[in-house]
Structures are given as C-alpha cells and as structure tokens.
Image (cartoon, rainbow, N blue to C red):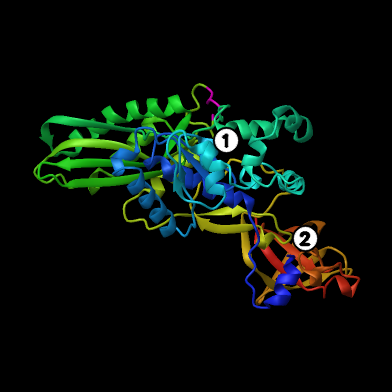
Amino acid sequence: MTLAHARALDPDLLVIAHDREQDREALARLTAWGLWMSPLVAADAPDGLFADLSGCTHLFGGETAFLERLCADLRSFGHNAFVCISDNAAASRAIARSGQTAIIAPGAHKAALRALPCKSLPIDEALALRLKRLGLETIGACFDLPRAPLAKRFGSAFLDCLDQAAGLRPMPLSFVQERIGVQCARSLFEPIGTAEAIATVIEALVPGICAQLLERGEGARLVDFLCTRVDNTIQAVRVGTSDATCDPARLIRLLCDQIPQIEPGFGIEAVQLVIVQSAPIRQHETALPGYGETHSTWPATLLDRLANAPGLISLARLHRIDAAWPEKSRHLSLQGPVDRECHPETAPRPVVLLDRAIPIEVTALLPDGAPRQFRLGHALHRIVCAEGPKRIAGAWWQDPAAFGITRDYWTIETEKGQRLWLYRLGDGVHDWTGPGQWHLQGMF
C-alpha cells in the first residue's frame, strides 16, 4: 500500500519518517541490554537478537521461566517480540521470524521447521516469491528435494540457509563484547579525614586508572570519587572534562579541587575511583621545550576547572555555525566537548560583535561610496580611514524573501582612533538590494 493510498483511507494517519540510523542505534542498545541473559549476545539486523543460553537458563528457573521473563521485559519496552529456544541458532531465528514463541526439544528443530514458510529463512522477498510460484511454499518441501537442482536453480546461498537451519552448517555470529568498567579501589589501614590525606590517596589512585584508559586508547570524560566512611555511608564527588583525557596531573587537580565538598565524618576507610564515561582520545601536538602547555590543551584545562568549580551551575560557550549574516554565525549553548575542528580562514572580524546592529546616520559623497562621517545618538564621528566594501548576500536558499538583499561592510577608523564595523543595507544604487540604511555591527 502506498502512503497516498493509506492517507486516502485515513486522513488523520500519523506518518513518521523511517530513520535507519536510529534503528541501528536502538538495536545496539537492545543488544547491550541483552547481556543479562548471556555473555554471548549478537544482533540480528534489522530487529532481532541471538543469545547463546548454554548453561544460563537454570539461573532464571528454567527455560519456561526465562522465556516468560524475557517476553515480559520486552513487552514493557513496547516491543511485540517472538522468542524461540532451540539447540540451533538458524532454526530459532526461522521459527521466531514466522511469528511463533516456542521451546524446541533438543534434536527436534528440523521437524519444527518443516511446516514453516520459506520466507522465514534469511532470503530476499524475490526469492521467496519464486519458491512460492514453483510450489515450494514450506521449508520441508525444500528439504525433500535433491540438493544439486536446488543449488543450480536458486544458488548456493539458499542452500547454505537450508543447511544452517537443519544444523548441517555452522552459522557465524558476531557477539558483542561486554565493556568492563574502568575503576580502582583501595581499603585504607586507618581512617583518614584531612584534606592532605585525601589528596594523597587521589594522587595514588589516578595514575593507575589513567594507565588503564591509555591501554584502551581512551580518555576520561566523567569521573566519580567515592569515599566510604566508617559509619558505612558514602561521600561522592564527580568531575567532568571538556574532552577525553588520560593526563594524571589534570585529573588530580580537578579531583583535589573537590576535596572541600567531602565530609569525612569520623573518618574514611575505603575509596574508589570510577570512570563513569570515557571516549576515544585524540593525540595532540607536543609542546616545544620551555613553552609549557600547547595551544591545543590549555583551553580544555581552563574549561575543566571552571565547569567543576563549586557553586557554578553551568558553563556556556559560543559555537560557530554557518550563516549568511554575521550576527547569526554563533550559537550559545551549554559547555560541551572542546571544538578542535579547523575552520577556514576568514576576513578579520570585530572583537565585539553586536547581536543587534545599531542604526546610524551616515554621510557619504556617493550613494554607493565610502562613509565620511556618521552620527550615533547626538555625537558626530568623523572618519579618517575606510576599507571596503565587502559584500555579503542574504541566504536566499533558506528564505526566498532574502533573494537579492545584500550588505556592504566597511571597516572604518574615526579621528579618535576607534575602529568600527559598519554596513549599508543594499548596494546604494538599486532599491531591490535594500533600502540603503547604515548600521553599526561591531568594534575592533
């Protein structure tokens, strides 16, 4: 049924665009969730899972109890799932894909497959339709035919599907790898309570956890420092970094800054350092001898200390975005990873860029010529130097009303030494490019 036909039948039909990337991400999350069933779980795109349950189902009260729990959990997530347990992965897949939930006795999977339609196998729709037209509507009918004619007419890939379902050929699966969390714990000989002692423990734990991260090629983004007191209560502090790092000195400084937030009570007898979130680390250029931190690392260090400062609610930063007009080329958002992407060189821009340009009165020798003086409020400013114009066109591909609209920008210097950024709305000659009004956009 086409979308137009469906909308004709139901005008109030809710239509949502299919996003394959979101489907892949959702399946990856579901696969990771399935690790509670077994350490061996694999995704079966686009909407299935495999799990090797050997030696696992008895932990949940047997196969029947496990099946009921799994189906209930999937229903709670909003999934209408079909589950099959058998001693063959390909057979379980075919049975579940046919819309059945079942437990197949050992060795009985081939008999359970015989009545299923051929489309239950992992074959394309065109091949399933060809089989149906030839009268091969079930998997059992294909089992009964000689192998050579099947391979000659339908290809070896179809024969491999049959052999895998029958258990004659192994089915390769790519199991997800469970990520082991990075953490480090230490029990103390005697309870501690001073800031110096807590700092000493932090300095002892951080290098080891950074070494673990370095082996993975990752860096910390979110770190928890947990202190267990003698009364069995926990004091916890959390620090975050603006980019992935495994620099011990940087993490030690951030954690030590949080020591005043820890209430040791009658003493701390155990500590634990946990990497809550990590990310692949990017190698930076090494600083020249005698020059300290590189230009690429000091902004992240500064942002870390500001973002983790006690009492600071949030830290925002300007992000560069592509836009036609200068005032729309930046966006203020909460602090995220430091942007290290290289941007192409642009013409010099003002240090102060006004969000809303200020209208001014300008005197010029010609309508499209350079400004000679301008009035801002009651003050008259004479211009001794003007560079321009540099023309910027409106984003006509986004807003049809901006078609033909231009701005002519001038960098000027007044007799008092002020360097300003002015623009004229339009080219000064043609009315359709703009009314010719002048504005102050920024200051150098």
Relative vertical location of residue 145 with respect to residue 259 in this rendering, above or below: above
Residue sitting at x 74%, y 60% = 324
Relative vertical location of residue 167 with respect to residue 359 in this rendering, above or below: above
The front one of 148 and 413 is 148
Q: Position of residue 127 (x, y in %)?
A: 74, 43
Q: What crowding class fits label 1: few (fewer than 14 Cα within 10 Å), some (14-19), or many (20 or more)?
A: many
Q: Is residue 406 magenta?
A: no
Residue sitting at x 68%, y 32% = 159
Whether residue 374 is visible? no
3D distance between C-alphas at marks 2 and 1: 71 Å
Residue sitting at x 17%, y 31% = 187
Q: Quadrant of residue 185?
A: top left
Boundaries of the magenta span? 283-288
Secondary structure category for the residue under label 1: helix
Which residue is disc 2 drawn over? Answer: 409
Quarter of the image with the C terminus is bottom right
The front one of 71 and 79 is 71
Secondary structure category for the residue under label 2: strand
Q: Position of residue 357 (x, y in %)?
A: 67, 69
Whether residue 313 is visible? yes
Residue 165 badge:
1
Query: In the rendered picture of this protein, how many numbered marks are placed on residues?
Result: 2
Q: Looking at the image, is mark 2 or mark 1 earlier in the sequence? A: 1
Q: Amino acid at mark 1?
A: Ala
Q: What crowding class fits label 2: few (fewer than 14 Cα within 10 Å), some (14-19), or many (20 or more)?
A: many
Magenta span: predominant SS is loop
The front one of 396 and 270 is 270
The front one of 266 and 344 is 266
Q: Amino acid at mark 2?
A: Tyr
| Residue situated furthest front in the rendering | 144
